[in-house]
Every structure is written in structure tokens, then in C-alpha cells.
Image (cartoon, rainbow, N blue to C red):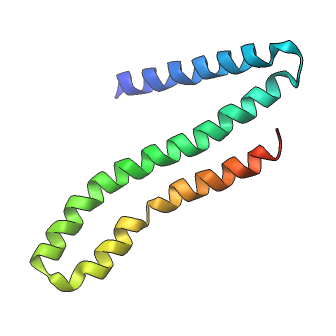
């Protein structure tokens, strides 16, 4: 877990450094780069969380449907619930796009 957090921290710092370097030309300051990093984090972390949640839900849903076929609808609903994380991330990304 420590390696994952260290890697994510280094990636975030690297993204901030690239954002600061790109906007150093004076065409909007560091704020524009930070908004772009925020957009990327909103979509990226939402997708990461969705993938992790679906990796846990999928096998459980298949097992439940194998034992009781009437649970198919419930399994599909539980499998689709984490997708809202990505949808919210994209909505936030579009809202931040208006600030660029």
C-alpha cells in the first residue's frame, strides 16, 4: 500500500510540475495548468475507483446468478452503480473546462 501511495504522490507532483512548466510562458499562469490537472484527476481517479469496485462486484454477481437465476436484474444494477463515479468525473471535467 505504501508503494501505491508513493507512486500516486510522485505522479501527482510530476503532473503539477509539467502543468507549471507548460504555463510558464505567461498565457494564463499556473491556475490553468492546475485546472487541467484537476480535470485529469477527476476522470482518472473515478475510472480507477470504478474498476476496483467492479472487480469485486463482478465475481460476486456471477456467483449469485449461478445459484439463483432470478438475481440477474439485481446483479446488473449493482454492477452498474460504480459507473456513476466515471460519469460524475466527466461532468466535473466539463465544468472545469469552462474555467480554462
Query: Residue 60's spot in the image, x, y percent?
Result: 21, 63
Q: Tell me: residue 38, above or below residue 85.
A: above
Q: Tell me: residue 67, above or below residue 52.
A: below
Q: Is residue 52 left or right of 60 when viewed as pictured?
A: right
Q: Is residue 51 left or right of 69 when viewed as pictured?
A: right
Image quadrant of residue 59? bottom left
Q: Is residue 83 left or right of 30 when viewed as pictured?
A: left
Q: Nearer the viewer, residue 43 or 64?
A: 43
Q: Residue at 73%, 13% (x, y): give it.
A: 21
Image quadrant of residue 29? top right
Q: Tell me: residue 57, above or below residue 72.
A: above
Quarter of the image where the C terminus is located: top right
Q: Residue at 82%, 47% (x, y): give it.
A: 98
Q: Tell me: residue 68, above or below residue 20.
A: below
Image quadrant of residue 17? top right
Query: Residue 27's spot in the image, x, y percent?
Result: 88, 22
Quarter of the image where the N terminus is located: top left
Q: Residue at 16%, 82% (x, y): give it.
A: 69
Give the total of numbered labels: 0
Query: Residue 97's spot in the image, x, y percent?
Result: 76, 44
Query: Residue 23's spot in the image, x, y percent?
Result: 80, 19
Residue lying furthest left in this view? 67
Amino acid at each position: 500500500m505504501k508503494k501505491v501511495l508513493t507512486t500516486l504522490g510522485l505522479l501527482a507532483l510530476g503532473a503539477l510540475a509539467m502543468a507549471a512548466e507548460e504555463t510558464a510562458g505567461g498565457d494564463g499562469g499556473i491556475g490553468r495548468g492546475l485546472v487541467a490537472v484537476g480535470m485529469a484527476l477527476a476522470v482518472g481517479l473515478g475510472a480507477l475507483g470504478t474498476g476496483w469496485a467492479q472487480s469485486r462486484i463482478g465475481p460476486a454477481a456471477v456467483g449469485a446468478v449461478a445459484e439463483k437465476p432470478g438475481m440477474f436484474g439485481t446483479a446488473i444494477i449493482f454492477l452498474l452503480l460504480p459507473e456513476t463515479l466515471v460519469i460524475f468525473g466527466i461532468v466535473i471535467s466539463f465544468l472545469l473546462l469552462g474555467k480554462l
